Amino acid sequence: MPSKYNIQLPVTWNFETLDEMTAFADENKHPASKSSSRTNGDGDWNGANDWPTAMRYARDGWREGTDLVYKMRDEMGLTDISDLIGESEVIMPDVMGGAVDLDRYLEGEPECMLYVDEIVADNPRIMDVYVNAAASWQVSREELERRGAATAVIVDALEGLNIRCEIIMLDMNSWCPQAYLGDPEKTSPERGGSIIRTVVKRAHEPLDLDRIAYALVNAGFLRRHCFAVHETQPDVPGGYGMPWMVTSEEVEGEHVMVPTMMGRRAEWASDEAAIEWIRKCLKPFMEVK
């Protein structure tokens, strides 16, 4: 794992791919005292009615999640991701094209036709997208889905700008007793905690929304697969721990930081709030309409 990901806690799992993470969760047995990941039913909370369904989503992709991404784009008034991109295209003269440059034609120039060319950087920028996947129990499935869909819209837009995205899911939890006593100043994962780090997409890989939708959008990534990874360890204080997060100050390089959900957050209370968050995140990178 590259050094930029090395945030070491008392218990740390590093997974290079989503397949590696879900296979580990599936193959490793958990103590009988912990079994939330395998509980049947309650799909309205954990994103999948049973473990086999969660595994199928992780393996084959989750089309319903992609539909949620497209729905959010539609609610932004977008018909195509290029609507977000601003000046990412340029009109170029050529011997063929979809329109005529009349001045060039009258001057007898062969390159009198016009075509639209996409601006592509010779050395594309790399953007790390850190998603703090942890969430409190009271956070609804709909809120998790809204956060994930908004994140996917951002990734899609940046990739459309030839900014190659690397998506890193972080399920970071504190076992520190102060976390449960409402004393954030004394709460620190380094005093007891865990982190599950899963690279869902490398920068050089093409964007497959169906494939990443399970990790980003479905509550099952956290409440089925991350729980299952935690369940491979002996019992720790506080069960699965209190949600914690990596902050922008703790990582290097260009990045987008998606916050954890220690309780409900205003950004995910409605589609309108999520769309406003998307625009705010994209503003430094492009002209957002």
Image (cartoon, grey):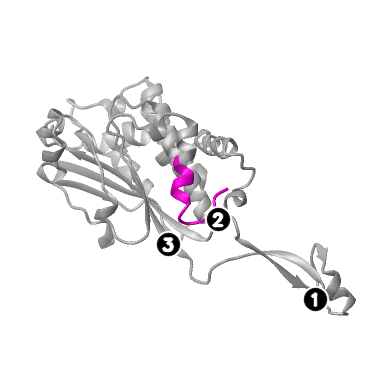
Q: Residues within 10 Å of mark 3 (few under 14, many from 20)?
A: some
| Residue 285 position in % (x across, y down) | 48, 57
> Quick check: can you spot residue 219?
no
Nearer-N-terminus badge (3/2):
3
What amino acid is found at the position of numbered circle 1 in the picture? Answer: Glu
**Closer-to-camera residue (6/289):** 289
**Closer-to-camera residue (217/62):** 217
For label 1, the SS is loop
What amino acid is found at the position of numbered circle 3 in the picture? Answer: Ile
* Side (left or right) of 81 relative to 22: right
> Which numbered dot is residue 126?
3
Magenta includes 283? Answer: yes
Residue at point 55%, 55% (across, down) = 160
Which residue lies under the disc numbered 2? Answer: 160
| Residue 43 position in % (x across, y down) | 40, 23
Quadrant location, the N terminus? bottom left
Compared to residue 112, the image places residue 239 above or below, namely above
Whether residues under marks 1 and 2 lie with C-beta atoms below 8 angstroms apart, the answer is: no
Count the numbered circles shown: 3
* Side (left or right) of 168 relative to 235: right
> Which numbered dot is residue 78?
none
Q: In which quarter of the view is residue 217 placed?
A: top left
For label 2, the SS is helix
Q: Residues under labels 3 and 1: Cα distance?
A: 35 Å
Q: Residues under labels 3 and 2: Cα distance?
A: 13 Å
> Which numbered dot is residue 111?
1
Residue at point 30%, 33% (across, down) = 135
Q: Which residues are magenta?
A: 277-289
**Closer-to-camera residue (83/208):** 83
Magenta includes 76? Answer: no
